[in-house]
Image (spheres, grey):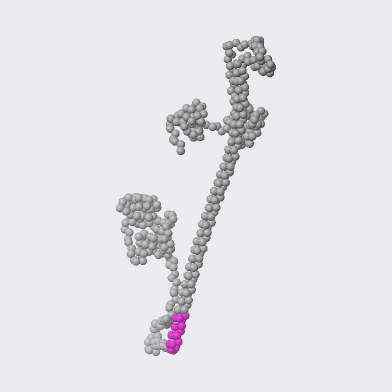
Amino acid sequence: MNRVWTEEELEILRRDREAKIPVPVTAAKLGRPVPATYARARLIGTLVQPHQSWDEASVARLRALVSADPPMTDKRIAAELGRTVTQIRWKMQDLGLIGVRDLSKLAKITASETVRPRPAKPASPRPVPDKSAIQARPVRQPVAERAPRPVQSAVAASSIAAAPVDPRIAVQQAIKALEDTLAERLKAFIAETEAGMIKAARAAIAEKGRIDQRLVIRVKRAAEAAARSEAAAKQAEAEAKKRALEARRREEEARRAEAEAERQAEEAARAAARERAQREMAREVASKPVASKPVERAKPVEKKAVLPTVQGASKAAAPRPAPQPAPPPAPKILVTEAPAAIRAVEPEQNASQISGRGGWKSVRRDPARIMAQAKAKAKPANRADAIDLAQAAQAAIERFIAERGVTRNETSGVQSVISRLQARGYIVVRDEKGWMIDQRHRIDCESDLVAFAEARGIALSAAA
């Protein structure tokens, strides 16, 4: 793990960048990796690499320079196009122009460019002897005893004739031959180095392609594995939901079958009890003697009033009243041992006026009871549900109080205002300091309470 950059190191990096010192030199100076030094230079804004896009003219110019004969080096092509060598090499690799140039010619050109010019040697202060004077020197005659060997004498004569050559000339010739040899070796070494670099670059490019392919394959396999696992999880979840629904359906069917069996058993028991009661009733009726039909009594003969003439009364007597119709006979009540039929309870249609905590108001009993029972188990989702629940609870309380004959006369105007607010759906709670309405509004005195009610259309006179 790289260590943290200090202010001294950052200052050295800034000074080196201002002085155009290469980043690898600065990295070696600081003892840090070159990529990390490049990254830090970019972060502090001292290394800005401008982006140069490649258009068709630039690509065509690059192709022409690469295909030129004699071939041009990367450095010369970059100088011609005004770009860096890295950009040129990257674009050549992108276009497939790496192996277009003749490597042997390119190596010779590179070697000729890298050979330093030989400095001119200063002239020797000593005069160079003339070759004619050297050749004019008298040659010693061979000894007489050597005469019988003519071959040896000829070799000796040639060696004696070559001996007087100037050593400086020989040194210069040797140095020139050595320089030529070194130049040839250097060219061969440079060509071999470039060929090795090109080969290594091609190998690196191929390896990078294989690595990228392996990475793509790995990513694809990982994505496929994730997709398969997700699909398997979804399928398992769907199967679990399906099994749960199937189990719930079976439970419901079993429960429905049990309820149907119980209902049928109850119907059978009820039918059996009804048949048994009918048989017992028929048996009792058969065992009792047949009662004679009641004899209707003769209607009493109404006596006609004696006329006043018969009784010696005056003819001018008052007229008699018209006879009243006979009252209808009272209905006969027959008592049987069979159970009476159950009468359906008719719902109360009209609302009733009751008095309670909220004052005189019209309350629908059955809807309030149904709503209270339905919403007692559920949490209100919004304000409307909460108001409905509060009104249903208040109606239930008032109905409970009214059914037991308990009433309370509200003599205070503040209590009437509170009752009207509660009837509107507000939740009013009394505490030590005042009132809390809907757990949001704090009311400290009666005047604020009255003002709160009047702002919502509830007057104290109307409340009273």
Image check: 364 left or right of 67? left
**Secondary structure that dominates the magenta span:** helix
Specify whether residue 295 is in view: no
Q: 136 and 146: which one is in front?
A: 146
Residue appearing at x 61%, y 20% in the figure: 174
- Image coords of residue 229 (percent x, y): 53, 53
Which stretch appears magenta?
A: 275-293
- Image coords of residue 164 (percent x, y): 63, 14
Residue 276 in the image: above or below residue 73: below
- Image coords of residue 304 (percent x, y): 41, 87
Image quadrant containing the C terminus: bottom left
Is residue 278 located in the magenta-colored stretch of the structure? Answer: yes
Residue 39 in the image: above or below residue 348: above
Residue appearing at x 62%, y 22% in the figure: 177
Q: 300 and 460: which one is in front?
A: 460
The image shows a total of numbered marks equal to 0
Is residue 336 located in the magenta-colored stretch of the structure? Answer: no
Q: Quadrant of residue 117?
A: top right
Specify whether residue 249 is in view: yes
Q: In which quarter of the image is residue 426?
A: bottom left
